[in-house]
Image (tube, rainbow, N blue to C red):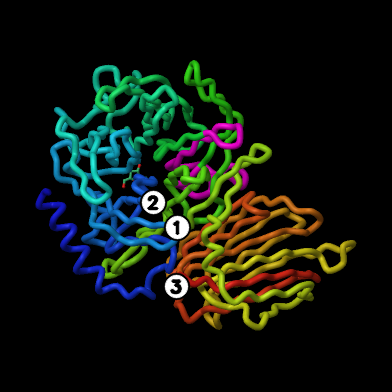
Amino acid sequence: MSQALRDARRYEEIHETMIQKESRPAFHLSARVGWLNDPNGFSWYQGRYHLFYQYHPFDSHWGPMHWGHAVSDDLLHWTYLPAAMAPDKPFDRDGCFSGSAMTLPDGRHLLMYTGVAREVTESGEVREVQTQNLAFGDGTDYVKYELNPVITGLNGELPEGGSRYAFRDPKIWMAPDGGYRALIANDMRGQGGQMLLYKSADLYHWERVTALAENHNRIGFMWECPDFFELDGKYVLLGSSQDMLPKGLEYHNGNGTFYFIGDYDSKNEKFIEESDHSIDYGIDFYAPQTLLTPDGRRVMIGWMQNWDTCNLHTKSTPWFGMMSIPRELHVRNGILYQTPIRELERMRRDEIIYENETVDNCEIALPGVAGRLVDLEVEVAPADPEKSFDRFAIRFAKNELFHTTVSFRPHESTLKIDRKFSGSRRAITHQRRCRVQHDNGKLKLRLILDRFSGEIFVNDGEKVMSVTVFTDLNAEGIAFFADGKVKINVKKYNLSPD
Ligand code: FRU
């Protein structure tokens, strides 16, 4: 083991003891210490789930990337394992960037990731060369392949115009023919991102097959973190885009995630794209990865943060960065539906139900409905089916000073999240809106609160809005507001990881 990895492991072991359990999310994975971004190597290996992450243990801000590591039986209770990789080889000395994992036929756990190494060009410019690398392990310790990199981006490995300096985040899987495939993000001169498909028979020799998707400057510039899978008879390609330009209510996040739904011509390895959408309409969601659970569910987890808003904390913050709730995915009517993994229901306690409560041009609280570790289901409808209402809102993480609001305007068919009063002292955009389907003002919402975040699932997962809220934990009120007359059904559970 290198000194760099030994240092990281010693540092995290000592410093994690200084972080109180209650000052982290209860069931969303957060950085063991320091900084966390993308989920990496999300996989099932030797009877449990493994989740690695982009990690800078020594600081709560981004820096030379390591891979942090945690394991879980249910994707909600996480146990940290020692950091899996440090930037300690010539091919990754400036960072072990994102990548994926799989179980090899011989039982080893494989990590495929991007190594970053700075290079000074003839004109004196410093560029970061990005190559694809392998590491093999037993679920705790990983050894980097000595002949890394396995894909350099040289010798025709990139198409004409493809950049060696923006070539990253391999997602590897085994194809039905027993060979390996890897989808890798790349920047194409003048066109923005493309997702390049590679194939290999032995993991060590790779050949470029095709571009499964090309940006042509439609959605932002560079693309990152691809994923690709079959689901419910369709194919889904996930990507995260930098520098997006908003279009209507789509793509407002600067850096944000998208999905394409389409078909796949496996003979010619061509993806036939049918539609593109945002994955999450909140403020904080990026770089998701999926896995297939042993019982066949496609589950996605993302970084619940956004590059545009993630550097506002101070150096002394002991941890920064957390994952989203793992979400089960389905394709229905050309839309990717997301629901919190069903294992969450085992954490539900203290059921409280209200039926046909009226909220009539006022704000009400319902006895027992409060907390920051909460699963809340709300069905909204106009009290008088003939007469719609102007606005309905749920305010959470609330006290006299603070609240975060989800509000529904049936006349506009929009849902808005607003965390202006969540405790942030920064003058940045704290709102997002999305279009929602409703039947004359009838809408279904589910809110998952885990201390420092809220994830709002609309109409059984048709749309999702995720936000982090670093609000004082004493602000635990939940209130319902109506401009007009609204009837609500409410089901509320406390969520307990114990
Ligand atoms: C996405 C990303 C990846 C890269 C990693 C670096 O958030 O920019 O493309 O591998 O983060 O930490």
Q: 432 or 355, which is in the foreground? A: 355
Q: Quadrant of the C terminus?
A: bottom left
Is 235 inside the magenta-drawn segment? Answer: yes
Q: Name the quadrant containing residue 318.
A: bottom left
Inspect the image, locate mark 1, and give the three-letter code of the amino acid beneath it.
Asp
Residue placed furthest toward the left: 3
Q: Position of residue 328 (x, y in %)?
A: 54, 49
Question: Is the C-beta separation of discs 2 and 1 under 8 Å?
Answer: yes
Q: Is residue 56 left or right of residue 262?
A: left
Residues in magenta, as a range: 230-257
Q: Residue at x 39, y 46 (%)?
A: 44
Camera sees residue 235: yes
Judging by the rendered image, the residue that carries numbered circle 1 is 74
Q: Which residue is mark 3?
A: 498
| Quarter of the image where one finds residue 95 | top left
Which mark is drawn over residue 386?
Answer: none
Q: Is residue 402 magenta?
A: no
Q: Is residue 448 left or right of residue 314?
A: right
Q: Residues within 10 Å of mark 3 (few under 14, many from 20)?
A: few
Query: Would you identify the image quadrant in which residue 89 lies?
Result: top left
Q: Is residue 111 visible?
A: no
* Residue 475 drawn at (x, y percent): 51, 79
Task: Inspect the image, locate mark 2, and give the three-letter code of the amino acid beneath it.
Answer: Tyr
Seen from this angle, which residue lies furthest right?
Answer: 386
Residue on which the image places disc 2: 49
Whole-number angstrom distance, CA of label 2 to CA of label 3: 19 Å
| Kind of element beneath mark 2 | strand
Q: Position of residue 162 (x, y in %)?
A: 34, 25
Task: Tell me the kind of residue under disc 3.
Answer: Asp
In this rendering, would 387 be left or right of 365?
right
Q: Secondary structure at mark 1?
A: loop
Question: Of label 2 and label 1, which has the lower sequence position?
Answer: 2
